[in-house]
Amino acid sequence: MVEKIDMILGGAQGAGLETTTQILSSAFASSGLGVLSDREYYSNIKGRHSYVHAEVSSGTVPRSLNSKIDLLGCMDAETLFTHFLDLKEESYLVYDVSISEKKQEKIKSFEDPLRERLEKKFDELGLEGTIDSIVRFLEEEKNVTIIDLDFPSILAELQDQYEISSSQASRYVSSILIGAVSGLMDLETKSVKQGVNDKFEDKQKIAEQNIFLIENVVKQVKEKVGTPLKMDDPSLEKDKKMMVNGNQVTGMGKIVAGLRFQSYYPITPAADESFFLEENAGESEEENILVFQTEDEIAAITSCIGAALTGTRSATATSGPGFALMVEGLGWAGMNEVPIVITYYQRGGPSTGLPTRGSQEDLTNALFSSHGDFPRIVLASGDHGEAFLDAVESFNLAEKYQTPVIHLLDKYLANFTKTTDIPDLERIKIERGKKAEDTDIKRFADGPISPRISLGDEVIWNTGSEHSPKGHVMEDPENRIKMHEKRMDKLELADKNMEMPERVKYYGPEDPEYLLVGWGSVKGPALDSLESLDERIGYLHLRVFSPFPSEEVLSYLEKADKIISLEHSYSVKISRVIRMETGISIDNEVVKFTGRPMYRDEFIEALKNIIEAGSQREVLRHGP
Amino acid sequence: MAREYGTENWIDWCPGCGNFGIVSSIYRAFSEMELDPEKTVLVSGIGCSGKMPHFVDVSGVHTLHGRAIPFATGIKMSDPDLEVIVNGGDGDLLGIGAGHFVALGRRNLDILVMMHNNRVYGLTKGQASPTLPKDTQTKALTSPNLQSAVPPLSLALSTGYTFVARSFAMDSDHLKEKIKEGMEHEGAAFLDVLQHCVTYNDIHTADFFRDRIVKSEEPEKERSEAFKKIREFRGSEEILTDVLYQDTEEPTFSERLEKKLTGFEERPPAVQNIEEDGKPILDQKEFLSRFDDLIFD
Ligand SMILES: Cc1ncc(C[n+]2csc(CCOP(=O)(O)OP(=O)(O)O)c2C)c(N)n1
Ligand code: SF4
Ligand SMILES: [Mg+2]
């Protein structure tokens, strides 16, 4: 019995891995296990290597992944070549014996540097470079238990049983992995079947064939090696839980908040949120959520502003390249005090960069993009629970302060699926801010926050030019000072009054020797590292960057002997922002900018190098 | 007495500018239609033309260069009860904002787009606009224009506008009528307004237009017929005006949305209620039941 395992399941993009993951995740969840799983893929629809890395635990809900794994399940040779070095001593490998002779040269989709790294490794280890040579190495040198399944004969049995063609049968390769994992972990047959049936609700035949194949594989696996990865009885609270990714949980937050207009132009990793909204908007006549695919991101933000001008809760969701096109519109919304929410999922840049990989490179872009000065509120979520609450709070803040809100997330969170508490709507507040009651009032009267008037209520004017309280173009210097101050004062007001979300949260001992500082998706590995070293380590998590909680941040920074910044970027924007806002320079940092997530073990290793060996900057690189 | 639609703002166009003709036709059209100022929105881009909303006493949204259409789109989709009119320059609508111009036609959203077609960039001091013919050299150009002109009516026709018309800034009776017809039309309407710029366009003057205008007869019902008519005028000195094409059958974007979101037309986003006593209107149970496949006991 085991308490926690890390596994990687891999195969070609488009070959069914996603479905496999959903079925397994639901089986884990209904067995009461905690799960965190990441999906890694290329900007490609079919053929390139993709994989899922999941951590499953009976004790707690995992917050980060470990780079060293307990189980590797391979749909193809590429997966085995790519990940065999990730296996721990005494771990488990599932693969297809019929590809034993396959050589790495035959894998056309490898990028050259990976091929070169592999060749070097093979030389080092004295391997021939076939699948078979790797398997023998793992078995002999690493004590890995090999579960060698004969995929073609498993599929042939299915073919015979249901009289289907071999090409039809070949679509079930990914289900072999479901069978293998279910067998090794001894998952309850009932939950696996349930997962399959849910997934293929209206395709009874396919469900039945999947179940036949899975049961066959489970039997073979158990006969070969038993159930060595059976988990301890779960000790998580028995409440209902959800298994959601960041796109979904943010979408849920938006629905709860009362979003009624969402514009978007398709882009990874944001578009899935809009699909989710389209699918899950309510059907009552008071809940028609209009999800609008525009001709570009300029139209996405400007139509969003248009909708907000009529009093509708409006948002748009995008990623770096799309945000770049929205910037002029963002300034217009600031100038005209329009409450809009931009949900900004960061991915690797610059330019198209690493379009399907994660990053936290855009903090300063979110904070400073657009010409001139206007108030903006910038929130950043570090996990699924925060993403839900921040999504709701973004709308409340936008309307209370009548100004644009940028909600920062990243591809990690977007695509990480996690066991998450069910939201309690009783605890959600909807605050729509000050509305005009008086009919004879000017739109931009007495600041900082003028009572809000929407199009359709009264005759109002808006303009991106500097304007009079009535909203007409006006270049007079005294008026300029008055209006500029009125708008900018809103930030100060927000700084004073903002209760939600918790702008800064500290985790750890009262008097830390080492203080980690981070935001967004570094939260998981950071929290998981606190107890791993002998030193007293704390983690300061930032969730609101504008208005920046300078004093509070300063009070924590001053307590620590040494500060270490964490960020998925090259240039550690959080250090720059903190220095700008508090005057404190942070000299140590752990960064990663390969677009792959920070893994717990590599992260802790990096901390050791800083704390024990005096390194200043650690660059993480794990992940193929 | 009929309502007046002027504002207290001093109109700062160059004396003699064709935009004066346009604004006065707007006043007349609105007066005759007795438009409710609170329910009418003029959305403009940036340029001399973009200043229009400040001179008309209905709600006004003076947006960004080229973006009047998508702003207007968000307004109209969220609150279809509002009467929405776009005022844009030729640079605004067919240069920087051309993609949005195309998108509006494809949607057939019920908006009237009025293009102030002076063939130059007025507010930036006379550069060539996308409607200035090739080889033409207006006052501010250092050499003749190297780029060909976009044919606005053909573009509107081929991208799906269901009302395509042209008028002239100084023919107020005609322009006023076309504005009314364009507003009454249900669907995307395009009105190309020939407008002289006294300061930067010394070629396409008011007289230039006045001498060349001819009126089309009945609007065509088939796009192909409308194209044919346009072709007949190619190479000729004459400029075709009037309603060239009108299609009243094609469903508007609201009607298309109604098919996807039942009840949309009755309860569009702007009138939906989202909270009660500071709480979401959602019922916890019903809300969670939407996510059955994501929730586990
Ligand atoms: C993004 C952007 N680029 C450039 C400008 C500068 N600009 C202001 S008006 C204008 C052109 C106006 O020409 P047109 O649209 O034909 O309007 P007109 O002044 O002729 O009515 C330009 C380029 C701007 N405001 N915004
Ligand atoms: S520059 Fe031309 S278009 Fe602009 S106001 Fe003057 S005359 Fe009119
Ligand atoms: Mg012009």
Image: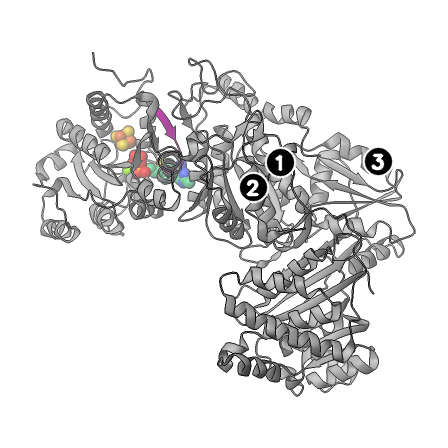
Q: Is mark 3 within 8 Å of ligand 1?
A: no
Question: Which kind of residue does numbered mark 2 sit on?
Answer: Phe
Identify the chain of the residue marked 3, using the numbered disc in the image.
A
Cα distance between the residues tagged 3 and 2: 45 Å
Does the residue at mark 3 contact the one at mark 2 (Cβ under 8 Å)? no
Marks 1/2 in contact by CB < 8 Å: the verdict is yes
Residue at the extreme top of the image, as rendered: B1
Parent chain of label 2 = B
The residue positioned 83% from the left and 59% from the top of the image is A605
The local crowd at label 1, few if under 14, some if 14 to 19, many if 20 or more residues have their Cα within 10 Å, is some
**In the image shown, does A360 or B151 lie closer to the viewer?**
A360
Report whether A504 appears left or right of B257: right
What span is colored magenta in the figure? B59-68
Alpha carbon distance from label 1 to label 2: 9 Å
Per the image, the residue denoted by label 2 is B287
Q: Position of residue B241 (x, y in %)?
A: 13, 39
Amino acid type indicated by mark 3: Glu
Q: Which residue is mark 1?
A: A425
Q: Is residue B71 left or right of residue A482?
A: left
- The reply to whether the residue tagged 1 has its Cβ within 8 angstroms of ligand 1 is no
x and y percentages locating residue A198 in the rendered image: 57, 59
Query: Can you say whether A458 is above or below A578 in the image?
Result: above
Tags 3 and 2 on a common chain? no
- Which residue carries the number 3 mark? A558
Name the residue: 50% across, 21% down: A435
Q: Is residue A172 above or below residue A310?
A: below
Q: Quadrant of ligand 2?
A: top left
* Residue drawn at the location 84% of the way across and 42% of the way down: A508
